[in-house]
Image (cartoon, rainbow, N blue to C red):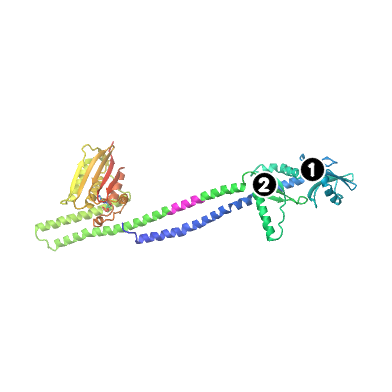
């Protein structure tokens, strides 16, 4: 058909552009937030885990602290204390009358430096930390009978205590373990020093198990921090990867649905625009087609009225022409009415068992009557053993007639038309074959669409509405049959109607 540059197609383009602008762009923008959410997902999961684990660490530490305040003394001198059956002291010392005896000789100088602090040690074992030139030490000491007995706390034992206390809390949630780690050193001043400490920190972070949360401990444990470390697969990575996949899939579904929606809406809009144009074409076509016979009729009537027709033979010719033109007019009006009845679902079919041969003969007779004197070769071949078919004889004969008319209209001067009716298994096939202009493959499906006409030189000069095949197809389908075409440009066409034989 002609290039669609009409008002309908301009309006289609406008509507489609509006659809893209008002629906697609905002939706795409909105889904951009989804993309940002995916990117930020890791940070969000990390934050959530840190918050949860910080709370847990605080609870664990409060419990550990309570246990350290109520240590159990298992031996007074040398001092040994336990908490939950965990022995905490790894190396003891005794201070009596200013004299120091240390289990580990190397630690004796440390104890000596701390002597002034021992004057305030109470009878109950206390934990305290001491910073000496040899390093920072965690000690437990108590006073008994004027002497001070104490020891250096084993970090491993303390860590064991922390793990024991924290065990019930670790049961749920991500697989993790608790650890007591030294506090991170404060980076030195200067860009280079800060850079170096940053690099060290990053390397340690990469080597150590990922930290879920860390709690800075109060005095006397200020040199340590309580850390929850992830065990096995990184839970942040796992959770964010899972959420990312879910977001990704949802976003994918969203885009696919959006694209399908736009495609579908676009196609529907395009079809509507096309249909609207076809209807406009149809109205002008029908008006034009109606005007032609009407003009002739008016002319002939005027001739009769003004007495211009003198002899009998001339009068007969004019009357014959009048009959022909009025028949053409009523056929056209009938087609339009038929179409409108079928479209609105008001068409009633009078179904009855009919021998197919009768329907074919009726169509051929009507066709011959319409084409009296036309030059063509019409071959009719009806098989003798055709079964009975339940059908509306007028409707089916009309459909066959339309095929015959098309075969005539769309063939050149040497018209050879063959009509066959034969049996094909449970079906009866009515076949109309011509040697006409043929139909290009891509148009073969569309010729059954209402108002559709193949754009060719011959069809442009041939009267027609583009409704005949559409009506024929609806009629055949109402009989639970089907209509098909086999054609090649320049080689002619064969239309086939398949109908089911009565049981
Ligand atoms: P009309 O003949 O009134 O245009 P139809 O619905 O009967 O409408 O046919 C639709 C179109 O299919 C025709 O316009 C024509 O282009 C094409 N067509 C139908 N039958 C034939 C045929 N036998 N050979 C070639 N083209 C055909």
Q: Using the image as rendered, state which of residue 196 and residue 31 is in the foreground.
A: 196
Q: Using the image as rendered, state which of residue 330 and residue 155 is in the foreground.
A: 155
- Residue 414 image point, x, y percent: 19, 51
Residue found 21% across the figure and 54% down from its top = 328
The number of discs equals 2
Does residue 22 appear left or right of residue 121 in this picture? Answer: left
Outermost residue toward the top in this view: 503
Does residue 35 appear left or right of residue 465 in this picture? Answer: right
Report how far apart the C-alphas of labels 2 and 1 lie in the structure.
Answer: 26 Å
- Residue 12 image point, x, y percent: 39, 59
Judge: label 2 CB < 8 Å from ligand 1.
no
Q: Which one is closest to the eye, mark 2 or mark 1?
A: 1
Question: Which span is picked out in magenta?
Answer: 251-262
Q: Main secondary structure of the magenta part?
A: helix
- Residue 1 image point, x, y percent: 31, 56
> Label 1 crowding class (10 Å Cα cut-off): few <14, some 14-19, many 20+?
some
Q: Secondary structure at mark 1?
A: strand
Outermost residue toward the left in this view: 311
Q: Secondary structure at mark 2?
A: strand
Q: Is residue 306 above or below residue 501?
A: below
Residue 352 falls within the magenta-colored stretch: no
- Which residue matches tag 1? 90
- Which residue matches tag 2? 229
Q: Is residue 348 visible?
A: no
Q: Which mark is residue 278?
A: none
| Precedes in sequence: disc 2 or disc 1 | 1
Judge: label 1 CB < 8 Å from ligand 1.
no
> Label 2 crowding class (10 Å Cα cut-off): few <14, some 14-19, many 20+?
many
- Residue 224 image point, x, y percent: 74, 50
Residue 257 falls within the magenta-colored stretch: yes
Does residue 19 appear left or right of residue 467 in this picture? Answer: right
Screen quadrant of the C terminus: top left
């Amino acid at each position: 058909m002609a290039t669609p540059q009409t008002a309908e197609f301009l309006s289609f383009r406008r509507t489609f552009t509006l659809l893209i602008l008002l629906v697609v762009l905002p939706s795409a923008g909105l889904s951009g937030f989804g993309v940002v959410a995916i990117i930020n997902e890791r940070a969000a999961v990390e934050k959530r885990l840190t918050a949860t684990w910080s709370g847990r660490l605080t609870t664990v530490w409060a419990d550990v602290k309570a246990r350290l305040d109520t240590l159990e003394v298992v031996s007074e001198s040398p001092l040994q204390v336990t908490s939950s059956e965990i022995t905490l002291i790894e190396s003891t010392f005794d201070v009596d009358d200013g004299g120091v005896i240390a289990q580990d000789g190397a630690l004796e100088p440390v104890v000596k430096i701390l002597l002034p602090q021992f004057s305030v040690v109470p009878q109950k074992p206390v934990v305290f930390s001491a910073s000496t030139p040899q390093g920072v030490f965690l000690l437990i000491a108590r006073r008994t009978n004027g002497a001070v007995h104490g020891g250096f706390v084993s970090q491993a034992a303390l860590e064991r205590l922390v793990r024991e206390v924290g065990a019930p809390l670790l049961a749920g949630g991500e697989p993790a373990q608790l650890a007591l780690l030294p506090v991170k050193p404060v980076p030195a001043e200067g860009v280079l020093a800060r850079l170096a400490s940053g690099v060290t920190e990053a390397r340690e972070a990469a080597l150590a198990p990922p930290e879920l949360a860390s709690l800075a401990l109060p005095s006397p444990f200020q040199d340590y921090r309580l850390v929850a470390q992830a065990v096995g697969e990184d839970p942040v990575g796992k959770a964010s990867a899972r959420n990312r996949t879910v977001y990704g899939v949802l976003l994918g579904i969203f885009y696919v649905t959006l694209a399908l929606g736009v495609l579908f809406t676009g196609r529907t809009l395009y079809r509507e625009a096309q249909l609207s144009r076809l209807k406009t074409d149809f109205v002008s076509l029908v008006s034009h087609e109606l005007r032609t016979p009407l003009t002739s009729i008016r002319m002939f009537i005027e001739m009769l009225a003004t007495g211009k027709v003198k002899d009998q033979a001339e009068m007969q010719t004019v009357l014959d022409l009048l009959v022909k033109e009025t028949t053409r007019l009523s056929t056209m009006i009938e087609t339009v009415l038929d179409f409108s009845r079928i479209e609105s679902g008001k068409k009633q079919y009078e179904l009855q068992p009919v021998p197919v041969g009768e329907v074919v003969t009726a169509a051929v007779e009507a066709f011959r009557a319409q084409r009296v004197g036309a030059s063509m070769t019409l071959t009719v071949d009806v098989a003798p053993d055709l079964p009975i078919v339940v059908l509306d004889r007028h409707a089916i004969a009309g459909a066959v007639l339309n095929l015959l008319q098309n075969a005539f209209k769309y063939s050149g001067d040497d018209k050879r038309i063959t009509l066959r009716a034969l049996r094909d298994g449970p079906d009866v096939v009515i076949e109309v074959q011509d040697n006409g202009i043929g139909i290009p493959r891509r148009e073969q499906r569309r010729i059954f669409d209402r108002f559709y006409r193949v754009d060719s030189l011959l069809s442009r000069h041939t009267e027609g509405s583009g409704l005949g095949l559409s009506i024929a197809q609806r009629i055949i389908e109402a009989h639970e049959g089907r209509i098909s075409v086999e054609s090649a440009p320049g080689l002619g066409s064969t239309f086939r109607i398949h109908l089911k034989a009565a049981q």
